[in-house]
Image (cartoon, rainbow, N blue to C red):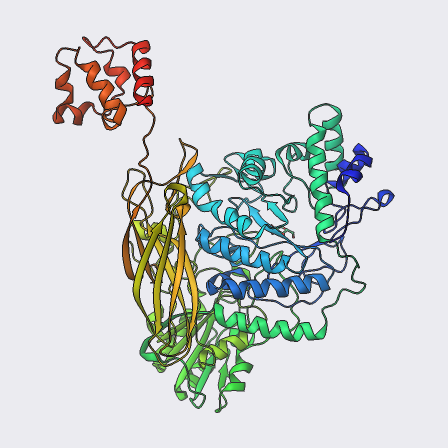
Amino acid sequence: MTEIDVDALLSQLTLDEKAALVTGASFWNTVSVDRLGIPAITMSDGPHGIRRQPDDREGGIGGSYPATCFPPAVALGSSWDLDLTRRVGEALGREAAALDVQVLLGPGINIKRSPLCGRNFEYLSEDPLIAGSLGGALISGIQSQGVGTSLKHFAANNQETDRLRVSADVDERTLREIYLAGFERAIADARPMTVMASYNRINGVYATENRWLLTDVLRDEWGFDGLVVSDWGAVNDRDKGVAAGLDLEMPSSGDAGPSAVVRAVTAGELREEDLDEAVRNVLRLVARTLPEVRVPDPVIPDELVEADHRLAREAAARCAVLLKNDGGILPLSPGASVAVIGEFARTPRYQGAGSSQIVPTRLDDALTAIGAIATAEPGFAPGYRIGEDEVDEALLTEALDLAREADVAVVFLGLPASAESEGFDRLDIDLPAAQLELLRAVAAVNENVVVVLSNGSVVRTAGWEDGAKAVLEGWLLGQAGGGALADLLYGIENPSGRLAETIPVRLEDTPAYLSFPGSGGHVRYGEGVFVGYRWYDARDAGVGYPFGHGLSYTTFGYSDLAVRVSGHGEQLAVDVDVTVTNTGDRAGREVVQLYVAAPAAETERPERELRGFAVVALEPGESRTVTLPLRWRDFAYFGVSEAAWIVEAGTAHVHVGASSRDLRLSAPVELPVDPIVPSLGRESSLAEWLAHPGGSRVLGEALQSVPGAGGFLSDEMLAVVGTMPLRRIGRFPGFGLDDAALDAMIAQANAL
Ligand code: BGC
C-alpha cells in the first residue's frame, strides 16, 4: 500500500498521459509517468502458482521464476474447503509478494458448462456456489498479503473454441443464476481488486465493450469498486471499452489503444469523465498494491519453498476424490505386495497447459512416495507411453508379468497434456485407448486393481471401472500431488474430496451436448439454468458419479435436522442445524451439503440447488452440530420481466446429505414471504384477471352488465378462453369494452 493522491495526480495529467495510463506498458506492466512519480505495477498469471516472467516484455510460457505449484482449480474445487483454500491463497500472496508481483491474474471461476471445455482444469465447479465461495476464499487469502487478484473471465467464457469472437447467447435468467452468480458472490465475499473482462461476446456484445455487464451489473448493482482489466488481447475498440467501464487494456497495444482514446475524446465521442474514471481506477490499484519497498531480487526464500511444498501436499490430499472402494480395498497396508503400473506414477501430470502453466519449485512423483511408505519394495512398469495411443506390446507384457505376481495392482491412468489445454476444447471425454487396453489386461490377471486418475477435466468412468475395485480421482494435484496420492493410498491421509462436477455416463448425456461449442460465431446456451447436476436431476437421468460424491475410509451418520425460520420477506433467515457423527473407526472429514428445492410454482426451477456446505473434521465416534444459514436469495430465481430476484411463497424443502444424490435428511420450510401479485395490464389474460384479488372483483362487477358473460366463466369455457387477453374478449359482440374502459379497470384493479 502506497500513499497516492489520486485526484491531485489526475488533475495534473495531460490527455495523452491519461490515454497512455489505461493501456499496459508491456506484457505484464502498467504504464509509469515519471514526471509525476507514478510507478508501474506488475501482473502475473497463475493462479495456482506464480508465473512471473523475468522479462516483462516476454509473453511466452515457460522460463518463469520457480514458484510453488499448488493444486489447480479443478482439484481445489473438489476440496470444498474454504479454510484450506484461503490458506493456499495466503501462500500464493506471499510468493507473489516475494516475486514482486502486485496482481495475480486469478482466480478463474467460470462455470463448467460442458466437460469438453479445454480450460476446465482452471475452473472450480459446475455450480456457482462452489465457484464463487472458493474463488472468494482464494481472493481473501491472496489479498491478505497486500497482493491484488483478478477475478476472471467475466463472463460466460465457457469454451475455448473461437473464444476471442464467439457470442455466448444466454438468456438473462440463466446468466444471473448460473454464469454471473459465482462472480457476484466472490465480489461480495472478498472484494477482488480487479475483475478481468473476457474475450467473448455476450448476446452479441464484447464483454470488454459491454456497459450492462461492466457498469450496470458489476458496479451499480454489485458495488464493485476495483479495476476492470481486459483479458490479454480482448480489446476490440478501446474507446468503446472505456465508455463501457473497461479501465485497463492489457497487454500493451502499442499506440493503438491510447491513440483511439485520444481521438475519441477529441472528437467528442468519448466523455473525458469516463476516461478520468478509468485513470482513477488504475491509480487506485497502483496505490493499493504497490509495496513501500520494492523487492530487489525476485526469489522465493528457501523457508517459504519448504513450507509451501508441505502445504501443497496437504492441500492435494484434500482434493483427490475417492470415487469407489469396493470391499475396502483401500487403504493399502504398507506390507502388501504392490505393482505400480502406469507412466503417470513416475512422470506426474500435475498442472494444465496454457497461460496458467508455471515452473514448480519441486516435483514429487507417486512412485517414489509409495516406495517411501511401503515396507515391501513396490514393482513398477510404465505400461504405456504418455501421449501415444497405440498399445506397446513389450510394455504391456512387462506390466502384466508384474501385475500377476502382486497382491494389488495400482494402475495410474490419465490424460496427456496434449488432450486438454487453454486454446482448444476436447472432442471426447475418454481416456486414451491404449491405457484402457492396459487396464483391461491387468484386470484379467489380478482382481485387486486400484485406478488412480490424473486429468484436468472429467473423464468417463463407465465402461472400464468394473475392472477396478477402487478409483481415486487425482485430477491435477500440483507439484506435491505424488506424495499426497501415496498418503491417500496408504491411509496416512483419509480422502475427503467431493466432486465439484458431475461425471456423466456418456458425453451424449451432458447438458450442452447439442449446442457446444456452437457455430457461425454463436453458441446458444439452450439448456438454460439446467447446468451440471441441475440437468441430470431435472431429467432424473443416470450419472457416472453425482455432483458432491466422494468416499472416505470412515463413515458418517446424519441426525437431528432442525430448521429455524425467522424474519419476513427479504429479511428471511432460515438456519439449518444438523448433527454429523463419525460412525467409523478412523478420523475423517465429511462435507455436509445443503440443497434447497423451491416451492412448486409456475416458473420452472431446478429440482434442488446447492445452497450451503461445511467441512467437518471428526475423530471416530465424535459428533458435531453444524449450522448452515440460508437467506432470502437462496430461495430466489431471477424474474426477467420483473428484472428482479423473486421468492415465491409456498413450501420449500431443505435436503441435507453427503452428495446431490445421497440426501440423508429433509424438511419442509414454509416461506414467510408475501405472495407475488403481478400487476394487471392490457395483455393480461382472463385467467390472470380472475386470479388477481382486485382484478376478479373489478371484472366481476363489469361483467354484470354484459348479458350472457357468465358463460365465459364456466370451467369448460375458462379452459378454452382463459389464456385470452381480456382486451381481445372485450371486443367480442356484446362486451363493448374499449381501451379507455379497460385502462380504467386496470387502474382500479391494481389499486385494490
Ligand atoms: C488468458 C488469461 C490470462 C492472460 C494473461 C489469456 O490468454 O485467458 O487467463 O490471465 O492470457 O496471460
Q: Is residue 453 above or below residue 125?
A: below
Of 669 and 460, which appears nearest the observer? 669
Q: Is residue 455 left or right of residue 292?
A: left
Q: Position of residue 715 (x, y in %)?
A: 13, 27
Of 386 and 594, which appears nearest the observer? 594
Name which quarter of the figure residue 722 lies in: top left
Q: Residue at x 85, y 43 (%)?
A: 36
Q: Is residue 458 left or right of residue 105?
A: left
- Image quadrant where one finds the C terminus: top left
Q: Is residue 481 left or right of residue 668?
A: right
Q: Is residue 410 above or below residue 133?
A: below
Q: How many circles with numbers are drawn on the protein?
A: 0
Q: Residue at x 51, y 78 (%)?
A: 382
Q: Position of residue 390 (x, y in %)?
A: 47, 68
Q: Is residue 584 above or below residue 568?
A: below
Kindly give the residue lying farthest to the right in the view shown.
35
The answer to whether residue 421 of the structure is visible from this angle is yes
Q: Position of residue 519 (x, y in %)?
A: 47, 40
The answer to whether residue 255 of the structure is visible from this angle is no
Q: Is residue 154 above or below residue 236?
A: below
Q: Residue at x 61, y 46 (%)?
A: 196
- Image quadrant where one finds the N terminus: bottom right
Q: Position of residue 181 (x, y in %)?
A: 47, 46
Name which quarter of the figure residue 290 lies in: bottom right
